[in-house]
Amino acid sequence: MKFNHEEEDNNISITRYESMLRSNDLKFFDSDEFESIIHHYLENGKIAKAKKAISLGLSQHPSSVNLKLLQVEVLVFENRLEKANNLLSQLYALEPENEEIYIQKANILSKQNNHIKAIELLNMALGYTDDSADVYSLIGMEYLFMDDFENAKTNFMKCLEADDQDYSALYNIIYCFDFLEQHEEAIEYLNMFLNKNPYCEVAWHQVGKQYFDLKEYEKALAAFDFAIISDDYFIGAYLEKGKVLEKLKKYNEAIENYRITLELDDPTSFALLRIGKCHEKLGNDELAIQHFSKTVHEDPLLDKGWIAITDFYLRKRDYQKALYYTNKAINIDSENVLYWKRYAKINNHLSFFEEAERGYRKALELGNYEIETWLNRSDTLRLLGESDTSIQNLHQAVEFYPDNAEVHFRLAGLYYEIQDYEKGEYHIRKALDLDYEYHIILEELFDKIFNLTLVKNIISEYK
């Protein structure tokens, strides 16, 4: 109840302050009220209003160190570091044991990438603070900036020891364990934490995720069940439990868990997509496509939704519908490589080779340099009678895959076709040196070239 009274008082102060601004009738507020008002604006990202409140606050309380520290915070936010430093030096002379001065100095050093010195100052702040959890968290973040995950983890653990309700610290600890690939150690730590906090749904949830990463699905399932027992409104636990049940091929149970999340909150595209995938596995095609459609309606920018629909029709060999949905996806996001790859593949199946070539070309332009994309584009260009462009495309591929036999065999075939025998021989010998077995490419794609005596003689040299 105390918190509610404090919150109510803060709201009254803010209402009274904003009424003063509208009426332009200056009223007195004590320094604590100004602090609450400024914090309110800062937390809501209203920097200009926070600055005005600081200015008014200091005009009424010119000696308030806390208001000046809030001024420093705004200066640091605006990257006016020299002015912030000067003000902190003045405040240090007044209150050398004020931990917030050390914290703000550390904040400035952190912005200047001097993380080691920032940590030194934060360690000094520990000697003066009543809120060690907050300072340990800041030290942990500094170590994270330096990619020192072991020391970061240690300090976040100290933070959690000081405040076992600080779940952001718990998440950061697990982030460090994950980065270090210490899944077993993470489980051991979480179990120690759960011995003291047996109904912490966040910890059970994280235990489940660790077991999931280790592919120990039954143990993961048990952990997510405990998370749900601890908080039966915990949507994340139901989602993760659904993923585990999918791995165990218990698709109906997975659907049930995903459906619970839809009842607890607004529908999420992830849950709708997974329900669709489960129905597809169960052979419920109509329900699968219904949920894929709901997925893209809920979040048109989610590429996994459009890809699920497209791949569904691809597997059914219904290329017209697959193309229809791929075109819809491209109209929404024309920069998505995954859409263009499918566009090319579908058009290839439909023998629309000009459109297929456009898809491969677009995928390459967007940075998809997979060898299959280069090779498919080359083969499509050849089908379209554009041998020179096909050769140019393969030479671009050579820059990324200089030792790929498939590229060189294709170049050999194309050069022989345009009767540039010198370059044809160079590339066939290069390809044979790299991988003799791939000479079957010549037989499959360039049968007339393969049957040339001069080509057979070269191949026979490498048997």
Image: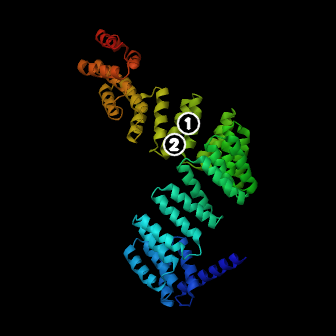
Left or right of 413: which side holds 268? Answer: right
In the image, residue 38 lies at what x, y percent?
53, 78
Is label 1 in contact with label 2 (beta carbons under 8 Å)? yes
Mark 1 or mark 2, earlier in chain: 1
Question: At numbered mark 2, what does the secondary structure look like: helix, strand or loop?
Answer: helix
Q: Is residue 107 visible?
A: yes
* Quarter of the figure that contains the C terminus: top left
In the image, residue 382 lies at what x, y percent?
36, 24
Cα–Cα gap, marks 1 and 2: 9 Å
* Quarter of the figure that contains the N terminus: bottom right
Name the foreground residue: 351 vs 417. 417
**Structure colour scheme:** rainbow
Left or right of 355: which side holds 97? Answer: right
Q: Is residue 267 visible?
A: no
Left or right of 88: which side holds 218? Answer: right
For residue 390, the mark is none
**Residue at the spot of label 2:** 329
Residue type indicated by callout 2: Ala
Q: Tell me the quarter of the picture where residue 214 sits.
A: top right
State the count of labels. 2
Residue type indicated by callout 1: Thr
Residue occupying the point 64% across, 50% down: 187
Label 1 crowding class (10 Å Cα cut-off): few <14, some 14-19, many 20+?
many
Residue occupying the point 52% across, 66% down: 138
Label 2 crowding class (10 Å Cα cut-off): few <14, some 14-19, many 20+?
many
Is residue 408 depicted above or below 36 in this figure?
A: above
Residue occupying the point 67% across, 42% down: 244
For residue 310, the mark is 1
In the image, residue 98 lies at what x, y percent?
51, 80
Looking at the image, the residue that sits furthest to the right is 229
